[in-house]
Image (tube, grey):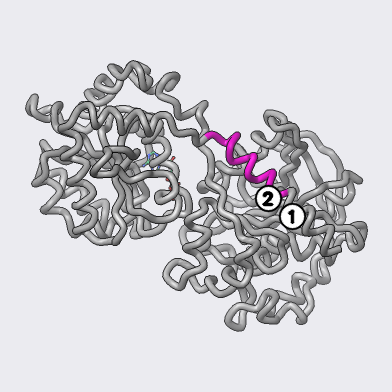
Amino acid sequence: MVASEVHPFAKTGGLADVLGALPRALVKLGHHVDVVMPKYRTVSAGQPIGQITVTLGGQVDVADVSAVIDRGVRVVFITHPAYFERDYLYGIASRDYPDNPERFAFLSKAALTWAASTGHAYDVVHAHDWQAGLVPLLARRTVPEWQTNPPATVFTIHNLAYQGVFDASWLPRLGLGWDLMRIDALEYWSRISFLKGGIVFSGIITTVSPRYAQEIQTAELGFGFDGILASRSADLVGILNGIDYDQWDPERDVNLPVPFSASKMAGKAAAKRRVLEAFGLTGTTDIRRRPLVAMISRMVDQKGFDLLDQLSEALPALNASFVLLGSGEPRYEERWKQLAERHPNRVGVKIGFDDELAHVIEGGADMFLMPSRFEPCGLNQMYSLRYGTVPIVHATGGLFDTVHDVDRGTGRGTGFTFVEHSPVALLGALGRALEMFENRPGWRRIQRAGMREDFSWDASAREYVKVYERAISANRVGA
Ligand code: ADP
């Protein structure tokens, strides 16, 4: 695998979590996985395992390669101090480093050069996001050993919003020919896109939920890539991310005051008291009885904060309390702080990032609200299900795939979903949840149904193995 971030070595988002967990799950299934990433400043060197010579355009570099074995997975670091010894991974604040095309083309080429040098007969090269987008193309073009018999290639889109779009004048500087400036190659509106390279040249493309795989082929959620993705529809597969049950399991979560399980739920009430205290919602005994609706989120439009803004009068009027842990756009932080000031017995807000508190909230809340506009996979709804915290979600992407709307007639389901992304629809789902909360046996059944769901990496890794097998047989046919 080739990626720009891998937990626990470097992380800015969910990509790193997947790279930290998926290779390990594959190793458990008996496969051999090497993961290649840059040696950033934050990464300690590992064991030296060799040197490689990498040619990029007119430039020839000799790079040190080192590695560590992390829980059965070999993680290989490519050293290039001028490219990777920096304060941040991709840029400062929202300004990307101007040489990012060169940095990540180098990573891709170095990873392949190293892989070819090992003499190991890799069946598959799996590249992730735009930073490794050139890998499928370069695997065929630039590794002499692989020109007749290249490994199969798989490319995963973790976030379609980042597309690695650069000026076409980069082509010669990256040692790439102008023949790639075509609509069926790297060209994207007169520029080049690394993401497009990954999509066009890989054997199979995956993304992080089945629903999102469909949605990104539509104009609404395709971010300009819907046409390109639709043209590869037959080779586009959605596989849900797993969650790490070593971290997120109420039976062994050290952050909870009292652990709990589907058959022994008393600990959930203890966690609820802890959450209410943490947010200062301690005024009246009524508060403890009222349903507690939680959010843990980046405070941005993607997560539905524009929608929530339109509900600042309606939410506090409901028979519920709300707690929010998050940070993000200053205007949203400000509005939520004001809301908490206006309704000190109804709304609690903490601006910041607090992993420990996030665990207690998942344990103690009755409901979890995720009104995301789009959501490639989403993790918190899966944590919530595990903790008997009933999710209320916009039926999009991974949220659609993981939360089953409670049926009015039978009462079966694991959460409450709304289809139209509107304040009225959100209130409708929330209203149904609040009503059901009063029906204790009905509510327990929904909680138990969610707690029984399996979102382990093991299941997802098996899906990836199927994709690898498909990519390998397609590769044989194509060769
Ligand atoms: P995204 O990656 O788009 O932000 P996800 O739901 O996939 O959304 O994952 C977000 C992860 O970050 C979850 O594990 C969530 O608990 C965590 N998280 C987000 N904001 C906070 C916060 N303020 N404090 C603690 N954890 C947070």
Q: Residue at point 32% right, 41% down? A: 415
354 or 195, nearer to the observer:
195
Q: What's the CA distance linking mark 1 and mark 2?
A: 6 Å
Identify the image quadrant of residue 271: top left
287 in relation to 226, above or below: above
- Residue denoted by label 2: 467
78 in relation to 247, above or below: below
Q: Tell me the quarter of the image containing the C terminus.
A: bottom right
Q: Are marks 1 and 2 in contact (CB under 8 Å)?
A: yes
Q: Amino acid at mark 1?
A: Ala
Magenta span contains residue 457: yes
Q: Amino acid at mark 2?
A: Val
Magenta span contains residue 73: no
Q: Position of residue 79 (x, y in %)?
A: 75, 48
Q: Is the residue indicated by label 2 positioned so its CB lies within 8 Å of ligand 1?
A: no
Q: Secondary structure at mark 2?
A: helix
Q: Position of residue 240 (x, y in %)?
A: 53, 46
What residue range appears in magenta? 456-468
Q: Badge 2: how crowded within 10 Å, few (<14), some, or many (20+)?
A: many
**Left or right of residue 161, residue 61 in this image:** right
345 or 154, nearer to the observer:
154
Identify the image quadrant of residue 260: top left
- Residue denoted by label 1: 471
**Left or right of residue 440, residue 139 in this image:** right
Q: Position of residue 372 (x, y in %)?
A: 35, 54
426 in relation to 411, above or below: below
Q: Main secondary structure of the magenta part?
A: helix
Identify the image quadrant of residue 311: bottom left
Whether residue 350 can be seen here: no
268 in relation to 390, above or below: above
